[in-house]
Structure formats: C-alpha cells, structure tokens
Image (cartoon, rainbow, N blue to C red):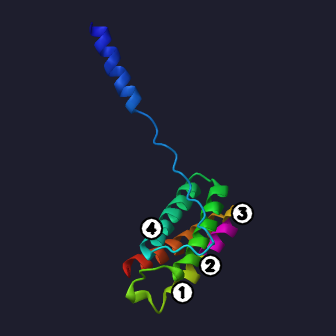
Amino acid sequence: MRSAIFGSVLYLILSGCRLPPEREPLKPLPEDGAQFTYAELLARARLQATAALEAFYIDSWMEVEDAAKALEQTARFLPKTTEQPAALKDTLAQTAADLGKEALKLGVAARGKNVSAANEAMQQITLQIRELKSKH
C-alpha cells in the first residue's frame, strides 16, 4: 500500500517536471495587404527581438538570422498598421525604417557570426521597440 502511494506521488512529481514546449516560430506576415493593428505588430516585434536574443545566447546563428528577417518584415508593415498612436503619426515611418535597418544589420552580423555587431544591433532594436512602446 505504501509503495503504491509512493509510486503514484513519484509519478506525479516526475510527470510535472518537464521542459516547457518549444516556442512556435512566428510565421511570416502575408504580403497580400492584410491589415494589422499597431498593437499587434508592436507585440510581434517584441517577440521577434526576444527570439533573436535567446538564439544569440545559445549561439544559434541561423535562428538569429531568421528572427532578424522576420523583424525586418514587421518593421516594413508598421507604418501600414491601423490604430496608430497619435503621437507617432509624424515619425512612425522613419522609426520603422530605422528598426528595419537595425534588423538588416542583425541579419548580416548573424551570417558572419559577429558577436559584437549582433549585440550592438540587438541593443538598438531593443531601444527602438521600447521607444515605440512608450509612445503607444
């Protein structure tokens, strides 16, 4: 009886101790003119920047490059979003273009496995996303 209870408790403990599921990669946005809200794409940019940073930590350069490509696409779509904050009406296109340029730099750094350049690009990306968030 005791061994059955002990075995059941041990099973429950061990079944609860598992790694979280792998994060599903974000799919590319459709290029067919679908409309997205500003909040949706800002959240997407944050997720992509986080994915790039996590991949960078484990030296998964291909994942860093993929995240950079996705982030560059998101930056291209930002000026076309609906429900844009009024504070960004005049500067959103330039800020999004700057974010896209940094994403391109991150992709180049990832292809070259250049730690310093990747780190610098990710810092700029993080600052730009934060700036977009603070105005939202």
Task: Give the spatial CA distance, label 1 vs label 2.
Answer: 12 Å
- The mark that comes first in sequence, 4 or 2, is 4
Badge 4 marks a residue whose secondary structure is helix
Task: Give the spatial CA distance, label 3 vs label 1.
Answer: 27 Å
Residue at the disc numbered 4: 43
On the image, the x and y values in percent for residue 133 come to 40, 76
The magenta segment is 102-109
Above or below residue 95? Residue 74 is: above
Badge 3 marks a residue whose secondary structure is helix
Residue at the disc numbered 1: 93
Badge 3 amino acid: Arg
| Residues under numbered marks 4 and 1 in contact, where contact means CB atoms less than 8 Å apart | no
Q: Residues within 10 Å of mark 1 (few under 14, many from 20)?
A: some
Q: Comparing marks 1 and 2, which lies closer to the viewer? A: 1
On the image, the x and y values in percent for residue 11 come to 38, 22
Magenta stretch, main secondary structure, is helix
Task: Give the spatial CA distance, label 2 vs label 3.
Answer: 15 Å
Above or below residue 18? Residue 38 is: below
- The mark that comes first in sequence, 2 or 3, is 2
Q: Write the residue at 53% across / 59% down.
A: 51
Q: Write the residue at 45% across / 42% down.
A: 20
Residue at the disc numbered 2: 101
Badge 2 amino acid: Lys
Pick whichever, 115 or 15, lies toward us. Answer: 15
